[in-house]
Image (tube, helix red, strand yellow):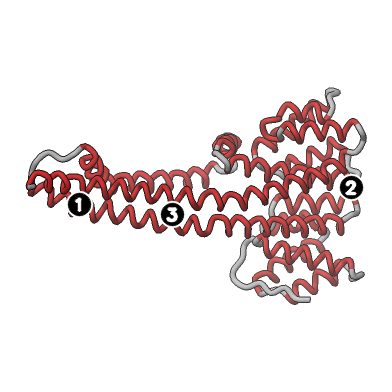
Amino acid sequence: MTMKISGKIDRFSDKKKYLFFSQLYSLLKSGLSFSRSFELLIENGSEDESKILRRVYNDIVSGNELWVAIKKSGSFSDLDCGVIRIGEETGRLDQSLEFLNSYYKKKNEQRRILTGALSYPLIIMVVAVLVVTFMILVVVPMFEQVYSRMGGELPGITRFIITLSSSTPAFFAIIAIIIILFFALRHFYGKSQKYRQITAKVLLSLPFAGDLIRMYYQSQFCQLTHLLISSNIPLLRSLQMLEDIIRFYPFSVSFGNIAGKIIEGGSFGENLGRYEDIYGKKLVALIKVGEETNTLDKMLFHQAADITMELEYKLKQLGNVLEPLLILGIGILVAFILIAMYVPMFKLGQTIH
């Protein structure tokens, strides 16, 4: 069993995490000890990956738990550390590794679906931007010079395109400044509560994309809560752990608030209903039913599968919707520019006739 990974890495990609968790799970299930399993992964990994795994292994030998060691390495996400922590605290590390194996397999599949759905529309968009930029910055000024020598009053549509052409460099400069400011704010304030709150609100308000993001975190919530409850971890403790694992602001905040309300005497489903805007009415209703019938773990398991399936379907539909819309929009934009530039020539031809 080998795991070859090349290139410099500071953080494992989702594909590499899938391979790592899959192979560690397989080795442990085959009956090998944890030490021997980890040593095999270190021996068969690339140089850069082996250094990270060796550092993790040394931390474990020094007395740290696995989840603490992988957290210190900086190569794994909060979700990875949290799930491994669940496995170690409940004595079900193999179940946690299986969960992460399945999670990253699904995530990689979703990424392939999204890439397939967006690759062609993105190519169309890039080509369109280049073509329109060339027309605005090169073709339009040529027409402008011709019309300035001819004299006369230009139609409003032509004047608009000429004005747009002259202001395009300033427009590009403004966009560049906005992008630089965004990355600077993210670098300095990316972990602050206010920044996370604002960015989450903006992302969830995006048409269509906001629904996909919401569904993605709903799926994570169902999968992780099912794992916690099926591992016999108390609900309050589960919510506290979820707060550290799922860091997307609205969900992270809701876990702490729901836990506080449960301590005061409320039910899980009832308090979850206070956040229907992020969990959805259907999920809240089904969780209430699961709680009342003592089948909450099964309900969460089925909902995780259903939401994931629906998310993948919507990702596939995304490409089918974007492609014709982009082609239509580009055609209209190019036609608008060409008409604006040729209208004065049509008028000149009529005048000469």
At a point 74% along the width and 68% down the height, the residue shown is 54
Q: Secondary structure at mark 1?
A: helix
**Residue 289 against residue 320 in the figure, above or below:** above
Identify the amino acid type marked 1: Pro
The image position of residue 52, as x and y in percent, is 69, 66
**Residue 15 against residue 346 in the figure, above or below:** below
At a point 79% along the width and 46% down the height, the residue shown is 224
Q: Are the residues at dot 1 and dot 2 in contact (C-beta closer than 8 Å)?
A: no
**Residue 157 against residue 176 in the figure, above or below:** above
The image position of residue 345, as x and y in percent, is 16, 48
* Near-viewer residue (341 or 141): 341
Q: Secondary structure at mark 2?
A: loop
- Of callouts 1 and 2, the N-terminal one: 1
Identify the amino acid type marked 3: Met
- On the image, numbered disc 1 is attached to which residue? 141
The image position of residue 112, as x and y in percent, is 63, 60
Q: Which mark is residue 231?
A: 2
- Of callouts 1 and 3, the N-terminal one: 3
- On the image, numbered disc 3 is attached to which residue? 125
Identify the amino acid type marked 2: Ser
* Near-viewer residue (56 or 19): 19
* Badge 3: residue crowd in 10 Å (few <14, some 14–19, many ≥20): some
* Residue 15 shows in this picture: yes
At a point 91% along the width and 44% down the height, the residue shown is 232
Alpha carbon separation for disc pair 1 and 3: 23 Å
Alpha carbon separation for disc pair 2 and 3: 47 Å
The image position of residue 97, as x and y in percent, is 81, 58
Quadrant of the rendered structure where residue 107 is? bottom right
Q: Are the residues at dot 1 and dot 3 in contact (C-beta closer than 8 Å)?
A: no
- Of callouts 2 and 3, the N-terminal one: 3
At a point 83% along the width and 55% down the height, the residue shown is 96
